[in-house]
Image (cartoon, rainbow, N blue to C red):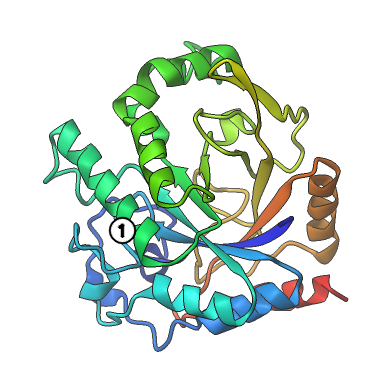
């Protein structure tokens, strides 16, 4: 599908922050409209084939009325199912739809302290997403590191060697998240939905198996693009998806570009930059997933819409 739109929108949008801890009050989530038609029309007009939206970020806020949490859009003044709106808009504009989902949930962790109960909660929410919104092209998971203590960093603080990282994932992270079971369970609902698990910028392009593809968060200049990997005694082709963001000015850990909207951030990538990213992705037979952060108005930033519409010129 080559080119898609990543959409970061949620409770953080209304508190001018990139990341929160599940403690932001819901009453501020009150946009006049959530203009998913504008998002999808812009995506379609610039040649994108799919949209991928944050169903839930690490804070635990759900952009759909999940039956398993009360930290959802249903309990805000806005009340409406944003994922449902997006699916309808995408269909009108000829786009496929995917969701991103954070494995950690900082809102629910206080009430689900038992690890098994928390894993059952994840299974239940993922089943909701798989069965409520039609055929999904992709689900993109985030946050594996919260149950990964080994093989993540070495003593000097630098990233551990790739081999050690992948082995540690299979020995600890995959086991503690019940990842193999989660992967198989969601495939029972939608066998054609592609599963990605964010390996972070420290290890972009590496697969946290079992997955159907690899990701490179802000990894437009990835040096090696190994597409075939051993899995269960066979060779598995794993395509690459590169995630980049139009914002070029960030804060804190995201100092080279925000994912969510911020009042003080009017920075945006140039047309030539976006085209350069697309060309690099094309050479690797990879997808470019380009992020936007709609504002509290429920619409794309004017600067994002402007540069996206220029891409087709």
Q: Nearer the viewer, residue 284 or 111?
A: 284
**Toward which corner of the image does residue 40 lie, by quadrant?**
bottom right
Q: Which quadrant is home to the C terminus?
A: bottom right
Q: Circle 1 sits in a helix, a strand or a loop, which is it?
A: helix
- Residue 151 in the image: x percent, y percent? 46, 15
The residue where tag 1 is placed is 128
Which of the 4 image quarters holds residue 273? bottom right
In this view, 123 is above or below 67: above
Residue 114, compared with residue 54, is above or below; it is above
Residue 108 x %, y %: 19, 49
Residue 272 lies in quadrant? bottom right
Residue lying at the far bottom of the rendered structure: 32
Question: Would you place residue 293 above or below residue 186 in this image?
Answer: below
Seen at 74% across and 34% down, the residue is 222
How many marks the image carries: the answer is 1
Q: Position of residue 37 (x, y in %)?
A: 55, 83
Residue 308 locus on image (x, y percent): 73, 72
Q: Can residue 45 be seen in the rendering of this structure?
A: yes
Q: Nearer the viewer, residue 158 or 202?
A: 202
Q: Is residue 299 visible?
A: no
Frontmost residue, 71 versus 49: 49
Residue 261 in the image: above or below residue 22: below
Q: Residue at x 65, y 34 (%)?
A: 238
Q: Residue at x 34, y 51 (%)?
A: 126
Q: Quadrant of the N terminus?
A: bottom right
In the rendered structure, the answer to whether residue 136 lies left or right of residue 47 reads: left
Q: How many neighbours does mark 1 have within 10 angstroms: few (below 14), some (14-19), or many (20 or more)?
A: some
């Amino acid at each position: 599908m080559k080119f898609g739109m990543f959409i970061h929108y949620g409770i953080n949008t209304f508190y001018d922050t990139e990341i929160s801890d599940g403690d932001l009050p819901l009453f501020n989530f009150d946009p006049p409209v959530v203009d998913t038609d504008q998002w999808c029309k812009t995506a379609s007009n610039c040649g994108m084939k799919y949209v991928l939206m944050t169903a839930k970020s690490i804070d635990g806020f759900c952009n759909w009325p999940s039956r398993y949490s009360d930290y959802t859009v249903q309990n805000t003044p806005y009340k409406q199912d944003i994922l449902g709106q997006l699916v309808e808009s995408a269909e009108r504009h000829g786009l496929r739809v995917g969701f991103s989902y954070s494995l950690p949930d900082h809102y629910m962790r206080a009430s689900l302290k038992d690890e098994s109960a928390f894993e059952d909660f994840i299974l239940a929410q993922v089943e909701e997403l798989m069965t409520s919104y039609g055929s999904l092209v992709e689900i993109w998971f985030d946050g594996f590191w919260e149950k990964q203590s080994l093989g993540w960093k070495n003593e000097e603080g630098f990233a551990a060697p790739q081999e050690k990282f992948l082995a540690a994932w299979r020995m600890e992270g995959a086991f503690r998240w019940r990842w193999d079971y989660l992967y198989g369970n969601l495939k029972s609902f939608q066998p054609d939905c592609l599963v990605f698990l964010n390996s972070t910028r420290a290890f972009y392009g590496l697969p946290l198996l079992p997955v159907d593809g690899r990701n490179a968060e802000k990894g437009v200049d990835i040096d090696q693009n190994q597409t075939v990997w051993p899995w269960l005694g066979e060779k598995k082709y794993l395509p690459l998806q590169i995630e980049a963001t139009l914002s070029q000015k960030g804060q804190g850990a995201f100092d080279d570009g925000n994912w969510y909207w911020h009042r003080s951030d009017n920075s945006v990538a140039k047309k030539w930059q976006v085209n350069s990213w697309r060309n690099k992705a094309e050479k690797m037979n990879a997808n470019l997933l380009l992020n936007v952060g709609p504002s509290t108005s429920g619409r794309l930033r004017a600067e994002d819409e402007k540069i996206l519409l220029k891409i087709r010129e």
